[in-house]
Amino acid sequence: MKMNQTLMNLTQFAVEQAKKYGADSAEAFISDSQGIDIEVNNREIEKLNARKQTGIGLRILKDGKMIFGSSNDLEKLALKSFLSDLMKKVPYHSVDPFNIIPGKPGEYFQKPWASYDRLLAYDPEVARVPVKEKIKRTLDMEKAGLSYSSRIKASMIIRYTDSTSVIYLANSSGISGWYPRTQCRGQVRLTAAHKDEQQSGRYRQASAYYHKLDVTEIGRKAAETAVNRLGAKPMTSDELPLVIDPVVTADILLFFEYMLSANEVQKGRSPFTGKIGTAVAGPIVFLIDDGKLNGGIGTAPVDAEGIPHQTTPLIEKGVLKQLLYDSYTAQKAKVKSTGNRIRGFYDQEGKIGVTNFYIQPGKAKRKDLIAKIDKGFYVDYTIGIFSSIDPTSGDFSIPCAGYMIEKGAITYPVRGAGISGNLLGLLKSIDNVADDLTWIYNLYLPGNPNYGSPTISLSSIKISGPGG
Amino acid sequence: MTKQYNPREMTRREFLNKITTGTAAVGFIWAHPAWAAAGVENPGQLSVPPEVLQKAVKILMSKGADFADVFVERATSDTYRSDDKKINTLSRVDKGVGLRAVKKGRTFYAFSESLKEKDILETAGLAADASATDQLEHDFDVITLRQQKSPLKFPITPLPTGIPIKKKIEMVRGLTGLAYSLDPRTIQAALSYVENYRHITIATSSGKLIDQVLGLTEFSAQTALKDKNGDIQGAYDEIAAYAGQSFFTGEYAFENIVKTSIKRAQNLLSGVDCPHGVFPVVLAPAMASTIFHEACGHGMEADVVSKGSNFKGKLGQIVAAKEITLVDDGTLPFMPGSFAFDDEGTPSQRTVLIKDGVLVNYLCDLIWGKKMGLKSTGNARRESFRVPPIPRMRNTYIENGALSHDDIIADTKRGIYIVMPGGGQVDVISGRFMMGVEEGYLIENGKITSPVKKASISGTGIEALKSIDMVGNNLAIFPNLGRCGKGQQWVPVGLGMPTARVRSMLVGGSGPSWDEKQGGAS
């Protein structure tokens, strides 16, 4: 996807027009994107949806009052009348002294964000590859799963999704620029059956690069988990050391993202409130948000309001060092924004969120973590995790499945387990971190947040199960 | 295929809804200033010229598709919100075209937010190419598009664009004040008033041309109270109709929505712990039918039936008590599940699903209907031009029985009375549900008494339908905003029923055990 000068000019036009209409400051964000969703089933294409989306999101600040609106009618006349409608509404908004459209003229960027090339988060192939080939690739993903074992009986979800976007941003404080980004996603869910038993396995992966998305691995890993799970025995209630698969940690990280948002901390809704500078995790834990990670799907030169992305250590050696800020919360706390305002499409106003958010890998091997445990539980499958954690208190009770660890080795699969505790307690009891950092995108979030974790182990956790 | 039912989640969905005024309703066209000022919206004119629609259909059919349609949409959404006494608005202008080629029951879809001829035809080519199984060009005769007419009209009075912004803000402010004045314990009031406008044009390979203008007005109130002991309870109420503000008077007045929301929070603070056990549950008119929408209605949608729902293969069989007639009706004036034509161009209709306890029909669109050898019942709906339509409910209700509400209550020695079910989980395939209770009361010695808190009900849809033993004559259908989610598409639906008693249902609560053998139905 090429840079479109008309769209770049349109962001400037919108900002200037808003100023003409009396705005104190204004911001225009255009996302121009295209992509495709492909679903196959039983070796044939089942569904296809090709997308083309281009629109503008506008923020206007007047007398301390902020208004947001979005439109995909990019005719200048339509845009002008939309802006004048926003100007009529903004006087009724409530004043908030911390409302801000950031930047001073010339402070941030004079030119397009070209140095971005080095960040490797854009692959022109994603838009170039013909639909037919993408369908074939999706079928290959299913094939890798179905051919893994004769016990694999059916594919439930085989989905390929990609997007190529160019972001254009301009504001009245002098921020102006554009950058492209790409993303390909593969998602597989399969069923394995043996005698009367059925088990499902799932896996997903994303890459900024078309050819780096490993469809064979996605299909195989989903099949492997389904087959390995056959013969699962009911879990017995116990308090045991726990090893957590990266697939599970990636979902838990979503809650740490929420709890580390300066907005939640400032409102006293986060268990991290008042904990800066204190130990909140085991000394082996480093939690980082890196918006400049090479090739990461969350990588971009700037955040949603034009603040440069940075590498932000949030937890270092177990000590809480930093929160995630956008310009609004930074102004409130009299600190600098960490460049963590995110938005997917033009129609979203944006909020605080992560870019490439991960637990730093350690030196140990995954098998070493398991080898140390005499009796423990390996969790790699959760059910309804997003309704099983209370982000305000951090309390959780997560239905899950996994494997028993006995005498330093994984022995048999178990089902019907539940792990419970508090997320802060969980962080504190992390006693080992492996070297196998794995990146997983979030299934339910549009846009680009990227979550990564190695296999980690916990000294102990409460486990419940129907086995008594 | 477990889905979450959470009314609070639904209402955060600002945008996306459905109503139609039919082609004859051109006089009601509600041109948003954003269109009108730009001269892009001429009342009575199609958003895209018919020749372009024709060309797009031809391209979609060119690789051997069995059916194709083009869905053009122009929409605006204006939200006026008050949260924590702070005023906020949200404005959105949206437009685009969805292009669909259906071949051997498979859907090849593409959409573009640009309505330029070049982009529409290119996007049509994408969907067509994906549907190709050979290299051949398939002939498709140029069809004559014939504009369809409907007698259904839902006039929007007054037009939202005719009401000054100031008046709307004042209204929201006034209602916020009301929430705080109704109860000094009010600590939160989040109110939202939304005006939605959609202009939809559909052209199909069978030659249908539909042009309809849709306007949905919504209001919701979420409140929270905090008592002396620091106990906090939140509650909710909402309303939506394909109508202007003049519709929202009397029982539909926005004031009543605020009052109900506060009353529900008060009930949760003062309520008694709900008894538990298996005993009679009396369902109040209107919203209690959410249970049947979730646990029965979804299982009758043709695509869910095909996946093996518990209504599969049961046409002509008894699936409910003989007093039960269940209807899905898209023709009720102003109701949030009504429209003149569905999103494939099939005229809306009143569809009887269960007649005197016997399953007589499913909810079909053209595609799944054909797979099952049934006709479309006009139930194809889509959230927007971004997604293909799927079979969905419209306004679903249980028909009147013969008994009076008072007689049903008086006949119930011990049980609970549910006005509004709350969030929960439903497996639409098996019809198994577990739902909370947002507003419910005890029934003791034939009288409705204290409100209950922390109640839940569970069972399966068919079990519940079969164990209904009394049906009232007071059918009410409430224009609720509760948008129904399926396959990540949200559409507004209507819900209704008369008072009805389920002889026995599993009720959860932290109160005393109420075994049905010790009381209940006499």
Image (cartoon, rainbow, N blue to C red):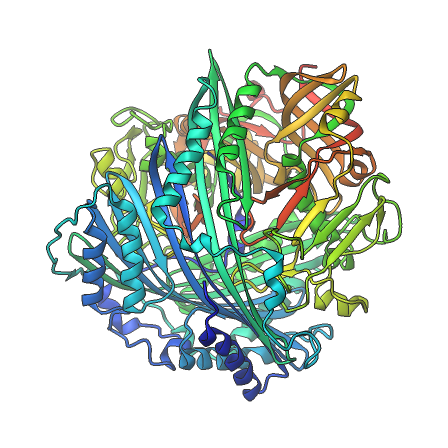
Front residue of this view, candidates A441 and A401: A441
Q: Give the total number of marks visible in the rendering.
A: 0
Residue B290 position in % (x across, y down): 45, 41
Residue A57 position in % (x across, y down): 52, 69
Q: Residue furthest top?
A: A195
Residue at 52% across / 84% down in the picture? A17
Q: Residue furthest front?
A: A118
Residue B484 position in % (x across, y down): 44, 47
Residue at 73% across / 47% down in the picture? A392
Q: Residue furthest right?
A: A278
Front residue of this view, candidates A178 and B42: A178
Front residue of this view, candidates A31 and B304: A31
Q: Quadrant of residue A399?
A: top right
Instruction: Mark yes or no: residue B139 visible.
Output: yes
A339 versus A462 height, above or below? below
Q: Quadrant of residue B211?
A: bottom left
Residue A339 position in % (x across, y down): 69, 63
